[in-house]
Amino acid sequence: MLYDLVALGETMIALAPPPGEIVLRASHLLVDHAGAESNTCVGLARLGLRVAWVSRLGTDAAGDRILENLNGEGVDTRWVGRDATRPTGLMLKEPGAGVRYYRSGSAASAMGPDVLRDVPVAGARAVLVTGVTALIGAEPHAAGLALLGSARGLRIVDPNLRTGLWGSERRVELVLPFIERCDLLLTGVSELAELLGDGGLRTLADRARAHGPSEVVVRGVSSVGVLTGEGWQELDIRRDAAVDPIGAGDAFNAGYIATRLRGGTVEDALRAGVKCGAAVTTAVSDTAGFPRQL
């Protein structure tokens, strides 16, 4: 099967209190799944693209639930391995305080380049990996580099910097090699500034493009811009009140990637990304609000 996109990365079981509540006072927690690459895969699958997600999960109920949910979304999980000695990771959402990860020693934190064995990476139209995969362990970092090295289609990277992970203190050193090997960079202004120094959207896009990507998308507070060989384009955005903003960047990525893979213009891709990002913030879930058409 020819895939539109193959993604590599960790997905966790995600727990969150109902809207308007906090973990301390909640009588129950909502159960979901969350992972930068799989979130994007869900969005792409809902838009009709053929996607595969590669990873490792524990042989536990959390892993079973993630596989069932992703399969139900139309994401191909045939190359997801199960690890009987390590658990599936967990993410706890706390309104007003962000998220807390419990992923040290998880099944995905030990996945190496061998997880790509038999995966048709070279035949995929695009591949996706984020900086999270670079930061959760030495083996996942190597797997991410192997994915980018084996790809013959569009190589897509989102730096997705996170604190509290195995490689967080060395994130510039670990994530820059991903950027240097990609064609399309999808990123936020703050994380790009952390990697390349302070500056505005256009300045940072110029610096990033000098590292190798031919197309650089930078999301800012009030606008999002794209730098390609044809120049710079920027679109103003409005941020409405959000039920849960987590996952909006992944949803933006899915809308943008889907449009570009279908031959759409940069302007169309920007508008699609903004629409998808806004839709996801309307629910306490990284993916539940994602639209099924653009």
Image (spheres, helix red, strand yellow):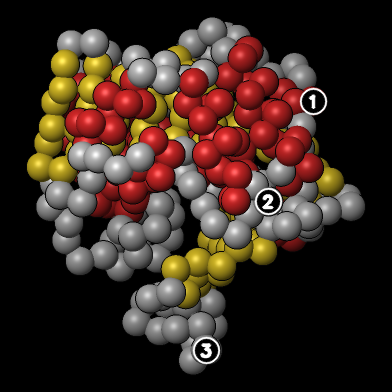
The vertical placement of 39 against 280, above or below, is above
At label 2, counting other C-alpha atoms closer than 10 Å, the crowd grade (few under 14, some 14-19, many 20 or more) is some
* First in residue order: circle 1 vs circle 2: 1
- Residue at coordinates 51% horizontally, 18% vertically from top-left? 181
Determine whether the residue tagged by mark 2 lies in a helix, strand or loop.
loop
At label 3, counting other C-alpha atoms closer than 10 Å, the crowd grade (few under 14, some 14-19, many 20 or more) is few
Rendered-image quadrant of the C terminus: top left
Q: Which residue is mark 1?
A: 114
Foreground residue, 182 or 63?
182
Percent across and percent down for residue 63 are 71, 53
Three-letter code for the amino acid on which mark 3 is drawn: Leu
The vertical placement of 125 against 220, above or below, is above
Determine whether the residue tagged by mark 3 lies in a helix, strand or loop.
loop
Foreground residue, 12 or 196?
196
Percent across and percent down for residue 180 are 49, 21
Rendered-image quadrant of the N terminus: top right
Three-letter code for the amino acid on which mark 1 is drawn: Asp
Asked whether residue 276 is in view, the answer is: no
Q: Which residue is mark 3?
A: 24
- Find the distance from the CA under tag 1 to the CA under tag 3: 41 Å
Q: Which residue is mark 2?
A: 166
The mark lying in front, picked from 3 and 2, is 2
Name the mark on residue 186: none
In the picture provided, is 192 more to the left or to the right than 100?
A: left
Asked whether residue 197 is in view, the answer is: yes
Determine whether the residue tagged by mark 1 lies in a helix, strand or loop.
helix
Percent across and percent down for residue 26 are 49, 87
User: What is the residue that sits farthest to the front in this orientation?
Assistant: 197
